[in-house]
Amino acid sequence: MEAEIIATGSELLAGAVADTNSSFLARRLRSLGWKVQRIQLVSDTESAIVEALLEATGRCKLVVMTGGLGPTRDDRTREAVARAAGVKLVLDQAQLTRLESFFRHRNRPFPSTNHKQAFRPATATLIPNPRGTAPGFVMPMQRCSLMVFPGVPHELRHMVESFEPFPRLRTQPQLDIDIVGVAEASVDERVAALTLPPSVIVGTQAGGHRIRLRLEGRTDAEMLLAHQTIWQEFGAHYLGAEGKSLEQVVIESAQQSATLLACAESCTGGMIGAKLTDVPGSSAVFRGGVIAYHNDIKCNALGVEANTLERVGAVSAEVAEQMARGVRARLGAGLGIAVTGIAGPGGGTVEKPVGLVYLALARADGCSVIERRFVGERDKVRRAACNTGLDMLRRAILGLPELAST
């Protein structure tokens, strides 16, 4: 069963606002068995919306549209839908009463511009919007069902999650598997070389440090076999099949093993600590961190030796190791992760170019250090260093092989 998504808004086409609604809807529809064939971005003009609607509703079973239900003059979705369907807009008295109550309870006058939000196409049924003034609606059009939602992301999500308006279809078994620390092209090549059940289809999606493999198959038994084959192929690079982030796996694994964590960060400026503390319950295992950007802080807060800094510089394996050992000892942690590097855009040399990063992990029985040369702009280098540090923690907590030193 095929579906399409249409997002209206000139601000989307201009790139001023990211279209997060379409990705949310696509995931939701996929989980219910729908196959999303197209996602369109359409301007606020009525003619453009009508054209997109007539094309989409003529070729699939479900069309979901977002945006253009507000009170302003450029919100033209209601008018466009009515025109495309060949019906009139009619006043919905229950919605008008709700709007009047909405503003009265907030001690605000009912603006005349909001009056248009009480109208709907004659053949439409309203979908309640508890968090805003613009209801959605559902109606038949050509060979499909059309569902229209407001474009405000938190309103749309609440409506979908509260009322579950989309029909659930019979679905084939589906599974998402996350791989970390391997380039997308390499993941794709390795998966293509595997012997998987012929009915299992695998797609890849890159997302920062994580590559997501999306599996669809005919039976649960075939999916289980494919899952096990992929798990064995990627070993320590296998993050999981539950959709958890790298930091979630780190914190949950640390909780299960009662491992206390601490971090010392230079070029990442607290990113590792921020990621870890994003996870609820992290306070049970995360002791804290030190952002040692200046050399004085490295010495005074972490115990890095001044002569080491003078001899090899702040961006070095020796300094990374002393930072990791220092933060572990001073914060009373079982594992101490440290990172120091040159994120750019300036500060690099021939010997130490932009992107050079050293990461160290201190344990009770020693300390391991790895060198990485990340490519990209400053933010990309910092995010890559952060994710690599989290991966080092994950491997250490789970007893997996350490990352290679280079």
Image: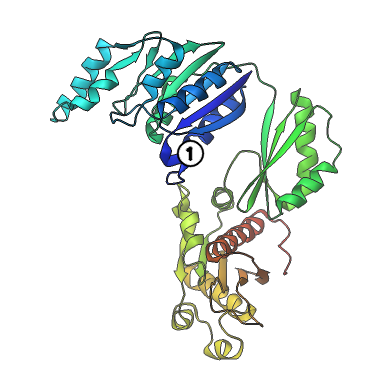
The image shows a total of numbered marks equal to 1
For the point 57% across and 47% down, the residue is 245
333 and 21: which one is in front? 21
For the point 56% across and 31% down, the residue is 39
Which percent across, then down, holds residue 223?
75, 30
Is 348 situated above or below 211?
Answer: below
Is 376 situated above or below 340?
Answer: above
Is 25 situated above or below 15?
Answer: above
Residue 149 seen: yes
- Mark 1 = which residue? 20
Q: Is 350 on the left or on the right of 106, as rendered? A: right
Q: Is 383 on the left or on the right of 11, as rendered? A: right
- Colour scheme shown: rainbow
In the picture, which quadrant includes the C terminus? Answer: bottom right
Task: Check disc 1 and report its element: helix, strand or loop.
Answer: helix
Quadrant hosting residue 142: top right
Q: Is 78 on the left or on the right of 7, as rendered? A: left
Q: Amino acid at mark 1?
A: Thr
Crowding near the residue tagged with mark 1, few <14, some 14–19, many ≥20 C-alpha atoms within 10 Å: few
Which percent across, then down, holds residue 28?
54, 28
336 and 60: which one is in front? 60
Which percent across, then down, holds residue 384?
60, 61
Residue 235 seen: no
Quadrant hosting residue 371: bottom right
